[in-house]
Image (cartoon, rainbow, N blue to C red):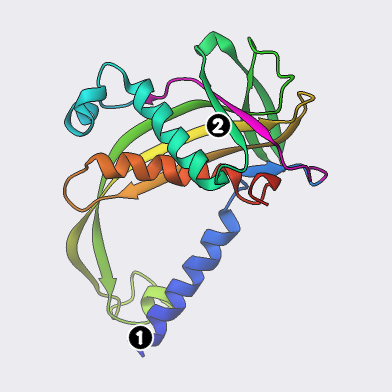
Amino acid sequence: MKNKLWGLAVLAFSFIGCAQNNPTVSINPTWTEKPTKITVVFTEPFVDNIDDLEDDLEEYTEKFADWYKAELKKNYDSLVHKSIDVDFKQVNIAGMSIEHDSVGTTEFNIPKPSTINMNEGYYIAISNAGFSRKEETYAYQAYNNSNFLFGSANDSSYVKNSGNVIVDRGLWFFADYAIYNQAGERVAFGHESFHNKFPYAMHRKHWETCIAEFVKKSLEETPILN
């Protein structure tokens, strides 16, 4: 009986989680053209804890944008398989304006290059990017009968058992992005956030995985990968 009740609890939680999900990307359904050239325009991401950068990417502490650009290039090139000419250009904050749009009730900050004439191929703008290591601690709690789901906390048969403390560690990466066609019209935009967990220590691979996941999501379901 306990197993069945636990299953119901998990199922209920899953439905609640799905209902609360907000859209993270919008793609213009009229966009069907596959680009022959793309320029990725980006601003340097910030790092919440410089000590992490010094530990995991020591040689890039003073030139983090170089590592970021190389990782973007590696992953975009890998996904387009040389079928598209991809170039990369870094701009400062002043070189990227921020527009605003929404999908339903979800609002987006949308980057757009402000110092580049977007008249040759497509452009992918990436801004407001950052890395942040987080650690959350909470206690695992189990309940010994059906009152967990259907009873009252004041019921004498309602017993709560405290278990082990759970520590959830991870490196977060988040960024806003938008894609523009050769006429300078926006054909897609989004915001992505990734949580790359680690059990004990963080290392270079976690940073690389964050960028790989972001690049993959930024191109999913677009004509770029068709």
Q: Is residue 132 left or right of residue 124?
A: left
Nearer to me, 87 or 155: 87
Query: Furthest-front residue in view?
Result: 82
> In the rendering, which numbered label is found on residue 176?
2
Q: Is residue 153 above or below residue 167?
A: below
Which residue type does callout 2 highlight? Asp
Whole-percent x and y of residue 114? 65, 12
When asked about the image quadrant of residue 156, the answer is bottom left
Q: Label 1 belongs to which residue?
A: 3
When asked about the image quadrant of residue 53, the answer is top left
Q: Secondary structure at mark 2?
A: strand
Q: Are marks 2 and 1 in contact (CB under 8 Å)?
A: no
Does 134 appear in magenta? no
Magenta stretch bounds? 30-46
Q: Estimate the spatial distance between the alpha carbons at disc 2 and disc 1, rounded to whole Å.
A: 42 Å
Identify which residue is drawn at 53% across, 47% down: 79
Q: Is residue 184 left or right of residue 133?
A: right
Quarter of the image for the N terminus: give it: bottom left
Identify which residue is drawn at 29% across, 45% down: 170
Which residue type does callout 1 highlight? Asn
Q: Is residue 42 left or right of residue 2?
A: right
Question: How many residues crowd around disc 2 within 10 Å: few (fewer than 14), some, or many (20 or more)?
Answer: many
Identify which residue is drawn at 43% across, 38% down: 74
Nearer to me, 109 or 7: 109
> In the rendering, which numbered label is found on residue 120?
none
- Point out the tag, 2 or 1, that comes first from the N-terminus: 1
Please give the count of numbered marks on the rendered protein.
2
Whole-percent x and y of residue 163? 18, 66
